[in-house]
């Protein structure tokens, strides 16, 4: 059986290398373009070779410690968004496979939860060490299937691994409590115990970090997991799962199924053995999961959509504001839930900011994520491009003006030009919903109160950004903003040591930090009576 598995991996690696070595679609046929094509093809071959040697090129689901195909042998294709080429075929799983994964996690829960915190910590630490040891391969795999530039992808690996490291440390700090009793013959105390089997449903925009941010604390607390990664980017999840096995984490503790999202989700929701659902994704899907969890009264954590305001006050440092807004808006080509979706600029600094910001955006290099100097990769697929186009068309039809970009990039595929658009109003889609693309809408405001009103005029409440040199204002506005995260003079605020989550319709619960551990724990009160008896 081991020989057959090795042969299968070898064949897949060969297919992977062959597919990724095909010439890329190019706009011109200049000698420099041919050179770039050869460099990219060589890089792809190198990635495939390293993944093959490390055993990270996994194309099956993981159930009970075994790599398995879909029971009906159906598959789905994983594409490189930069080229449209097929990277690999993975199983299109559904309800039956999910139910088996749940059973596997349920069986493993008893033994895993009985391990000491120190033992679970050691397993997680080993997993972290392996993630860091394979940082380069994982980063390249993220760029291949998700499209973000390699520098960002490597950053995601470090960021994602950080949640495993932090969880390994926090596993030993899950403390209970002793309560002073009002009666002399009683002793009262509180235990914290793992909630049970966790269904973790994750998105495509951070194919590693959104998994580790959930699975790390779940395992640290003693829970077992069934992971459902996005069918668009499953390869990174499978590679991370392979490393969890290499770390010695017992079979059944980590399971991965992918494919038919509705069938998998329905099975997770219907099962009484699944005691918690944790989800990162759209608000619409989050609401369905929340409603579906009611039938079995599951614990739910939801990290949903945002509509982040980025407020630039007259007293801001212009260079800091431009740099911070650029990072908040264009990271991952605007495809993050905390991306600045509206840039509110006070009238006194408006013209200077718009000019400086537009110049900075104009210098953003767009291209394949493996190309040196590229900071903007493709959007994830054609549907994402069409959404951006529809939002822009709505804004233009209502009076907005495109200052920069505003169209598909000459590279073709799902590449889109970084865009700056002014005269945006509150009734436009750009102001009401997430564009999830490289579009920066500019809105002008006069007073601090007006900025706060505009910023809070949304059902979302995930992240917000402020740029000001006035310390009193930074406190006032931070407190007034109805958001779970606020960055002051900083565009990148996420870290494993701080709580991440939103208010209003941006979700429930928190991820990361010591507070994120509580999402995977149940509190039990114990009363000991007759303590004065011999």
Image (cartoon, helix red, strand yellow):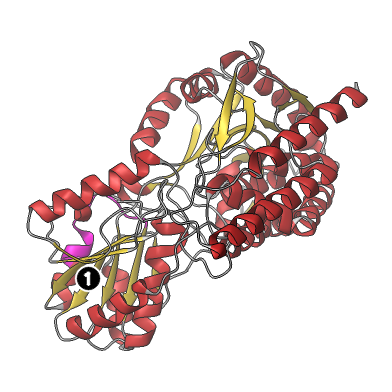
Residue 177 seen in the figure: no
Dominant secondary structure of the residues highlighted in magenta in the image:
loop
Q: Could you say which quadrant of the image residue 104 lies in?
A: top right
Asked if residue 50 lies left or right of residue 343, the reply is right
Q: Position of residue 140 (x, y in %)?
A: 66, 54
User: Where is residue 359 shown, x and y percent of the image?
Assistant: 32, 79
Question: Does the magenta run of residues contain 461?
Answer: yes
Going 35% across and 79% down the picture, which residue do you hit?
Answer: 322
Quadrant of the rendered image containing residue 268: top right
Quick one: 430 or 198, which is closer to the camera?
A: 430
Viewer-proximal residue among 383 and 344: 383
Could you tell me which secondary element the residue under label 1 belongs to?
Answer: strand
Where residue 302 sits in the image (x, y, percent)? 44, 42
Residue farthest toward the top in the current orientation of the protein: 72
Residue 156 shown left or right of residue 376 in the figure: right
Horizontal side of 51 relative to 396 (left or right) equals right
Q: Residues within 10 Å of mark 1 (few under 14, many from 20)?
A: many
Can you give x and y, in whole percent of width and height, for residue 232 in the image?
52, 36
Q: Is residue 248 above or below residue 357?
A: above
Lateral position of residue 290 relative to residue 15, left or right: left
Give the quarter of the image for residue 18: top right
Of the 4 image quadrants, the one containing the N terminus is: top right
Q: Which residue is mark 1?
A: 344
Count the marks.
1
Nearer-the-camera pick, 77 or 283: 77
352 in magenta: no
Residue 407 against residue 55 in the figure, above or below: below
**Which residues are drawn in magenta?**
453-462
Which of 259 and 372 lies nearest the eye of the viewer? 372
**Residue under the image location 57 percent in, 15 percent down:** 95
């Amino acid at each position: 059986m081991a020989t057959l598995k090795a042969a299968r991996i070898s064949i897949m690696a060969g297919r992977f290398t062959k597919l990724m070595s095909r010439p890329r679609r190019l706009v011109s046929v200049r000698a420099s373009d041919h050179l770039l094509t050869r460099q990219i093809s060589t890089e792809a071959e190198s990635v495939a070779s390293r993944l093959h040697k490390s055993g990270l090129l996994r194309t099956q689901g993981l159930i009970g410690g075994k790599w398995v195909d879909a029971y009906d042998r159906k598959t789905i294709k994983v594409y490189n968004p930069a080229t449209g080429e097929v990277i690999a075929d993975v199983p299109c799983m559904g309800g039956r496979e999910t139910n088996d994964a749940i059973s596997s996690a349920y069986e493993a829960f008893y033994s895993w939860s009985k391990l000491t915190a120190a033992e679970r910590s050691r397993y997680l630490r080993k997993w972290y060490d392996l993630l860091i040891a394979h940082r380069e391969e994982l980063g390249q795999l993220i760029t291949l299937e998700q499209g973000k530039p390699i520098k960002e992808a490597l950053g995601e690996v470090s960021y994602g691994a950080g949640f495993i490291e932090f969880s390994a440390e926090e596993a030993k700090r899950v403390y209970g409590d002793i309560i002073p009793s009002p009666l002399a013959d009683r002793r009262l105390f509180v235990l914290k115990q793992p909630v049970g089997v966790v269904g973790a449903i994750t998105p495509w925009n951070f194919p590693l970090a959104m998994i580790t941010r959930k699975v790390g604390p779940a395992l640290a607390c003693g829970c077992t997991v069934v992971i459902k990664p996005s069918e668009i980017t499953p390869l990174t999840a499978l590679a991370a799962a392979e490393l969890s096995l290499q770390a010695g984490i017992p079979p059944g503790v980590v399971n991965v199924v992918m494919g038919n999202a509705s069938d998998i989700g329905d099975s997770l929701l219907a099962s009484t053995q699944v005691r918690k659902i944790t989800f990162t994704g759209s608000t619409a899907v989050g609401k369905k999961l929340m409603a579906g969890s009611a039938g079995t009264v599951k614990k739910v954590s939801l990290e949903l959509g945002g509509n982040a305001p980025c407020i630039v006050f007259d007293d801001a440092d212009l260079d800091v504001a431009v740099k911070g807004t650029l990072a908040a808006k264009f990271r991952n080509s605007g495809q993050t839930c905390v991306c600045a979706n509206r840039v509110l600029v006070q009238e006194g600094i408006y013209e200077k900011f718009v000019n400086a910001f537009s110049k900075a955006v104009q210098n953003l290099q767009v291209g394949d994520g493996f190309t040196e100097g590229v900071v903007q990769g493709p959007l994830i697929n054609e549907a994402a491009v069409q959404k951006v186009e529809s939002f822009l068309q709505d804004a233009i039809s209502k009076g907005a003006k495109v200052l920069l970009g505003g169209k598909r990039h000459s590279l073709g595929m799902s590449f889109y030009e970084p865009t700056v658009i002014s005269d945006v109003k509150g009734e436009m889609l750009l102001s009401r919903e997430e564009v999830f693309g490289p579009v920066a809408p500019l809105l002008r405001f006069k007073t601090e109160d007006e900025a706060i009103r505009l910023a809070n005029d949304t059902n979302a409440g995930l992240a917000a950004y402020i740029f000001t040199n006035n310390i009193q204002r930074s406190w006032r506005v931070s407190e007034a903003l109805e958001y779970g995260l606020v960055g002051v003079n900083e565009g990148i605020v996420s870290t494993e040591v701080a709580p991440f989550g939103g208010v209003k319709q941006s979700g429930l619960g928190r991820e990361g930090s010591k507070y994120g551990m509580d999402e995977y724990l149940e509190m039990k009160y114990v009363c000991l009576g007759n303590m004065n008896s011999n």
